C-alpha cells in the first residue's frame, strides 16, 4: 500500500512541475488522437459490412441451404431446426447415385423410341412412361432445332417432376389418414415428427404441414427448369445437374464465372437430376420467400380447384433478382410451349403402391 501511495505522490509532483507536466499532457493527448484515428476506419468498415450483408440476406431466396425461420415466429432458438433435417432425404438420394452413368443423346432418343415415349401421345393420353434419367446428355446443346431440343428436354424432366409429386401425394394421403384418426400409433407419431423436421415446422402445427406438404404444378416446374438451364444447355445443368439454379454458401457447388474468388454464392451441385428436383420442391415448400406461393396454393385446394401454374407463378417474383420480369418469362414459357397439358399427366406405376394414384 505504501508503495502505491508513494507512486501516486511522485506522479502528482511530476504533473505539477510546469516543464514535465506540459510534456506529459501533450504526450497523452497525442496518443489519444492517434488511437482515435486508427480505430475509426475499423468501425466504419464494420458498419459498412453490416449494411452490405443486409442485401446479401435478402437475395438468398434460391438457397435451400440457408433456410431461416420467420422472424415473427414465437419459437425459442433451442426449437429451431437444423437445416440438415430439411435436406436429409435429399442428401441420402444424392449419396446413393455417385456412380451415375451418362447416356448420350442418341442412346436416350433410342430409349424413348423403343418405349414409345412421345409428348404428342402424353398430351392425349395423359400417361407418362417411368423413365428416370440420372444425367443430362451434353449433346443436347448440339440439337439445332429449337423445337426438338425443347421437346427432348421436356421428355427428360417430366418423369422426374411427376415422380417427386407422386412422393408428396403418397405422403399427403398418409397425413390425411392420420388426421382423420382419433388416436395415432407410435409409428404414425414418429412419421409425423420426421415430416415436421423435413418441412421446417418446429411448432408441430398440422395445419402448416398440410400447407407445406403439397405438389408443385408440373408446368411450373418445367418452365422454371427451362428458364434456369436454357433448356438444359447451361454449364450448371451440364456439370452439376442443377436444374433450378439453387444457391449455396456452404455446400458443394459451382462458382458463377463473373463472381470473385472465395466470395459470394455457388450454384448447388447434384449427383443426379432427381435430387435437384427434390431440392427445388423442398425449397418452394419451406423457404419463407415463398410463403405467399404456399398460401395461394392452399386457397386453390380449399376451393377444390386444380393447381394453376399461371396463378401460382405470380408469387415467385422473389425467385430471381429480376422479380416481376422473371414471372412474366415463366408465363410466356408455359403458354408458348403448352406446358399446362402436362399438369394432369400421370406417371405409369412402377410399383403396386403407385397404382392408387392413377
Image (cartoon, helix red, strand yellow):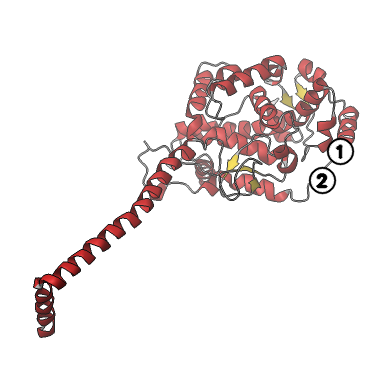
Residue 28, position as x, y percentages in the image: 22, 65
Q: Against 267, is 341 above or below?
A: above
> Is the C terminus in the top left, top right, bottom left or bottom right quadrant?
top right
Q: Position of residue 119 (x, y in %)?
A: 80, 21
- Residue 181 visible in the displayed image: no
Q: Residues within 10 Å of mark 1 (few under 14, many from 20)?
A: some
For residue 226, side relative to residue 308 (left or right):
right
Q: Residue at x 63, y 43 (%)?
A: 268
- Residue 341 place in picture, x, y as percent: 71, 17
Residue occupying image coordinates x 61% and y 33%: 168
Residue 314, image quadrant: top right
Specify the quadrant that holds the N terminus.
Answer: bottom left
SS label for mark 1: loop
* 225 over 204 or under it: above or below: above
Pointer 1 residue? 104
Front-lying residue, 159 or 21: 21
24 left or right, relative to 70: left
Where residue 230 sits, quadrant-wise, is top right
Q: Is residue 263 visible?
A: yes
- Give residue 89's quadrant in the image: top right
Find residue 323 and report its horizontal and vertical position in percent: 54, 25
Residue 101 numbered mark, or none: 2
Cα–Cα span, label 1 and label 2: 10 Å
Which residue sits furthest front?
19
Label 2: state its secondary structure: loop
Q: Residues within 10 Å of mark 2 (few under 14, many from 20)?
A: few
Amino acid at each position: 500500500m505504501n508503495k502505491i501511495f508513494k507512486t501516486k505522490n511522485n506522479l502528482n509532483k511530476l504533473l505539477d512541475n510546469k516543464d514535465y507536466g506540459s510534456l506529459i499532457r501533450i504526450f497523452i493527448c497525442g496518443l489519444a488522437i492517434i488511437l482515435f484515428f486508427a480505430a475509426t476506419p475499423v468501425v466504419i468498415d464494420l458498419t459498412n459490412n453490416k449494411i452490405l450483408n443486409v442485401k446479401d440476406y435478402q437475395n438468398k431466396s434460391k438457397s435451400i441451404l440457408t433456410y431461416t425461420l420467420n422472424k415473427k415466429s414465437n419459437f425459442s432458438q433451442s426449437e429451431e431446426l437444423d437445416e440438415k433435417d430439411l435436406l436429409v432425404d435429399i442428401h441420402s438420394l444424392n449419396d446413393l447415385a455417385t456412380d451415375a452413368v451418362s447416356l448420350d443423346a442418341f442412346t436416350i432418343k433410342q430409349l424413348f423410341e423403343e418405349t414409345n415415349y412421345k409428348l404428342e401421345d402424353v398430351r392425349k393420353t395423359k400417361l407418362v412412361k417411368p423413365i428416370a434419367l440420372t444425367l443430362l446428355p451434353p449433346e443436347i446443346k448440339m440439337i439445332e432445332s429449337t423445337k426438338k431440343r425443347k421437346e427432348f428436354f421436356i421428355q427428360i424432366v417430366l418423369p422426374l417432376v411427376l415422380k417427386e409429386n407422386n412422393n408428396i401425394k403418397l405422403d399427403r394421403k398418409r397425413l390425411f389418414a392420420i388426421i382423420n384418426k382419433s388416436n395415432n400409433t407410435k409409428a404414425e407419431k414418429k412419421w409425423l415428427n420426421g415430416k415436421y423436421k423435413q418441412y421446417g415446422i418446429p411448432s408441430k402445427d398440422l395445419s402448416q404441414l398440410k400447407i407445406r406438404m403439397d405438389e408443385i404444378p408440373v408446368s411450373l416446374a418445367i418452365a422454371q427448369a427451362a428458364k434456369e438451364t436454357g433448356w438444359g444447355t447451361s454449364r450448371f445443368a451440364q456439370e452439376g445437374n442443377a436444374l433450378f439454379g439453387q444457391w449455396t454458401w456452404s455446400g458443394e457447388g459451382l462458382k458463377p464465372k463473373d463472381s470473385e474468388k472465395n466470395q459470394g454464392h455457388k450454384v448447388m451441385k447434384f449427383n443426379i437430376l432427381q435430387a435437384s428436383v427434390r431440392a427445388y420442391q423442398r425449397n418452394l415448400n419451406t423457404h419463407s420467400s415463398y410463403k405467399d406461393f404456399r398460401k395461394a396454393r392452399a386457397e386453390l385446394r380449399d376451393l377444390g380447384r386444380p393447381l394453376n401454374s399461371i396463378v401460382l407463378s405470380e408469387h415467385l417474383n422473389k425467385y430471381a433478382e429480376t422479380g416481376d420480369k422473371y414471372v412474366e418469362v415463366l408465363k410466356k414459357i408455359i403458354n408458348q410451349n403448352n406446358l399446362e397439358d402436362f399438369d394432369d399427366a400421370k406417371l405409369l406405376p412402377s410399383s403396386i403402391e403407385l397404382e392408387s394414384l392413377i
